[in-house]
Image (cartoon, rainbow, N blue to C red):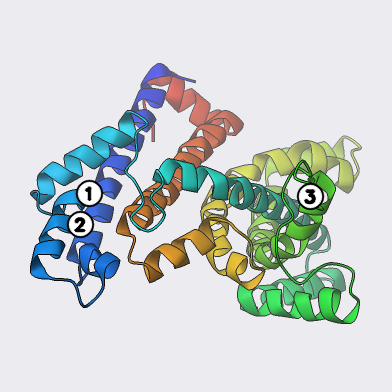
C-alpha cells in the first residue's frame, strides 16, 4: 500500500476528528441552562453560583475551555465528572467493558447472518429461496431494535425463563457474585441479537447485490467453464471481489451498532455507555456527555479509516492506485 495513500487517509482522519471536536463542543455550549445551577439547585444564591461556575471553569472564555479540553484529550487527561466527581476516562473505561463486547458480538452475528443469507439468496437468484431471504430481510429492516429487544425479553426471559431479563453479572466472579465470562456473555446474547437483526438484514441485501454483480463478470464464467462448481466459484472468486461494498457497509454498520447500544442497553439495564449517557444528560453532566460523544465520533472515524485501508487491500485496483500515489 502506497505511503502517499496512507498519509492522505491519516490526514483526513486527523482533520475529521478536529472538526468533530469543534462541533461537539459548540453544540453543547449552545444548550440552554447552566451546569452550576443543576449542581446547586434552584435555591442557590448568586454568590454560590458564581463560585461553582469558577470551580467548573464556566467563567472562562469558550476558546480557552475548548483548548484545555482538546489538549487534555491528546495528553490522555480528562476532566472530572460533575455528578460523579470522578475522571471521565475512568467512568467511560468501566462502561466500555460492556459496550464494546456487546457491539463486537452484535457485529459478529451480523456478519455471519448477512453473508450466509446474502450468498444463499444470490446463488438462488429469482427462485423461491431468493424471494424468501429478501422478504425476511425486508421484515428485519422494518423492525425497531428496542421493540425487538422487548420481544426477546418476553420470549426468552419471561416465558421460557432461559436467561434473565436484564442486568450484567460482570466479567469476573472475584467478589463472590455470579459473574464470569460465561454468565457475562449470556447476559449480552439477547442484546447482541436485538442489535444484529436490523444490521444483518441490511448487509444481506448489500451482499446479495454485490455477489450478483460479480457473478456476471467474464472471469466467473471462465472459472465455471473450466469445471468449477457454482459453489466453488462463489467462495473462491466471487466473494472476495464482492467484499469492497460489503466492507464499506460493515464500517457504517459498526458505527450504527455503537449508537444502537445506547437504547438497547437501557432496555436490558446494562451498565454500558448508553446508561452513562442517559444518566449524564439527566444530571446535566455535560463533561461526561461531551467526552462520550467525542469518543463515539472517534470510533466512527477510526472504523471508517480501517475500512478504507481494508478495501484498498482487498481490491487490486485500489492497491495499484495507492502504489502510484493516485489515491481516492
Residue 241 picture quarter: top right
Residue at (65, 64) in percent of width and height:
195
In the rendered structure, which disc, 2 or 3, sits on the residue that comes first in sequence?
Answer: 2
On screen, residue 64 versus residue 172, left or right, reads left
Q: Which residue is mark 3?
A: 179
Of pointers 3 and 1, the one earlier in the residue sequence? 1
Give the CA separation, mark 1 to mark 2: 6 Å
Mark 2 — residue?
Answer: 26
Q: Are marks 2 and 3 in contact (CB under 8 Å)?
A: no
- Return the x and y of residue 159 as percentages of the image width and height: 88, 82
Residue 272 can be seen, yes or no: yes
**Left or right of 124, for residue 9:** left
Are the residues at dot 3 and dot 1 in contact (C-beta closer than 8 Å)? no
Mark 1 highlights which residue?
A: 22
Whether residue 122 is visible, yes or no, is no
Query: Which class describes the residues within 10 Å of circle 1: few (<14), some (14-19), or many (20+)?
Result: some
Relative height, residue 182 to residue 219 (above, below): below
Q: Secondary structure at mark 3?
A: loop
Residue 314 screen position, x and y as percent:
61, 33
The answer to whether 125 is drawn above or below residue 299 in the figure is below
Amino acid at each position: 500500500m502506497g505511503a502517499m495513500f496512507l498519509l492522505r487517509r491519516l490526514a483526513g482522519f486527523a482533520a475529521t476528528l478536529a472538526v468533530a471536536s469543534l462541533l461537539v463542543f459548540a453544540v453543547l455550549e449552545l444548550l440552554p441552562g447552566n451546569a452550576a445551577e443543576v449542581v446547586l439547585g434552584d435555591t442557590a444564591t448568586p454568590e454560590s453560583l458564581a463560585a461553582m461556575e469558577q470551580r467548573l471553569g464556566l467563567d472562562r472564555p469558550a476558546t480557552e475551555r475548548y483548548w484545555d479540553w482538546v489538549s487534555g484529550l491528546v495528553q490522555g487527561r480528562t476532566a472530572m465528572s460533575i455528578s460523579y466527581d470522578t475522571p471521565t476516562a475512568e467512568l467511560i473505561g468501566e462502561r466500555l467493558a460492556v459496550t464494546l463486547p456487546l457491539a463486537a458480538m452484535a457485529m459478529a452475528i451480523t456478519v455471519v447472518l448477512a453473508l450466509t443469507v446474502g450468498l444463499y439468496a444470490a446463488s438462488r437468484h429469482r427462485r423461491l429461496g431468493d424471494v424468501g431471504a429478501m422478504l425476511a430481510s425486508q421484515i428485519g429492516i422494518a423492525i425497531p431494535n428496542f421493540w425487538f429487544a422487548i420481544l426477546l425479553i418476553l420470549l426468552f426471559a419471561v416465558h421460557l425463563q432461559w436467561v434473565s431479563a436484564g442486568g450484567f453479572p460482570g466479567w469476573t466472579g472475584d467478589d463472590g457474585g455470579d459473574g464470569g465470562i460465561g454468565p457475562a456473555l449470556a447476559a449480552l446474547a439477547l442484546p447482541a441479537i436485538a442489535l444484529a437483526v436490523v444490521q444483518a438484514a441490511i448487509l444481506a441485501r448489500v451482499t446479495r447485490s454485490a455477489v450478483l454483480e460479480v457473478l456476471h463478470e467474464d472471469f466467473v464464467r471462465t472459472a465455471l467453464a473450466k469445471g468449477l462448481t457454482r459453489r466453488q466459484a462463489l467462495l473462491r472468486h466471487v466473494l472476495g471481489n464482492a467484499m469492497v461494498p460489503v466492507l464499506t457497509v460493515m464500517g457504517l454498520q459498526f458505527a450504527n451498532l455503537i449508537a444502537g447500544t445506547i437504547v438497547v442497553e437501557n432496555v436490558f439495564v446494562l451498565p454500558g455507555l448508553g446508561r452513562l449517557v442517559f444518566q449524564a444528560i439527566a444530571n446535566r453532566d455535560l463533561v461526561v456527555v461531551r467526552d462520550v460523544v467525542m469518543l463515539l465520533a472517534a470510533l466512527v472515524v477510526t472504523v471508517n479509516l480501517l475500512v478504507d485501508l481494508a478495501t484498498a487491500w482487498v481490491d487490486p485496483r485500489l492497491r495499484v492506485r495507492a502504489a502510484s500515489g493516485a489515491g481516492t
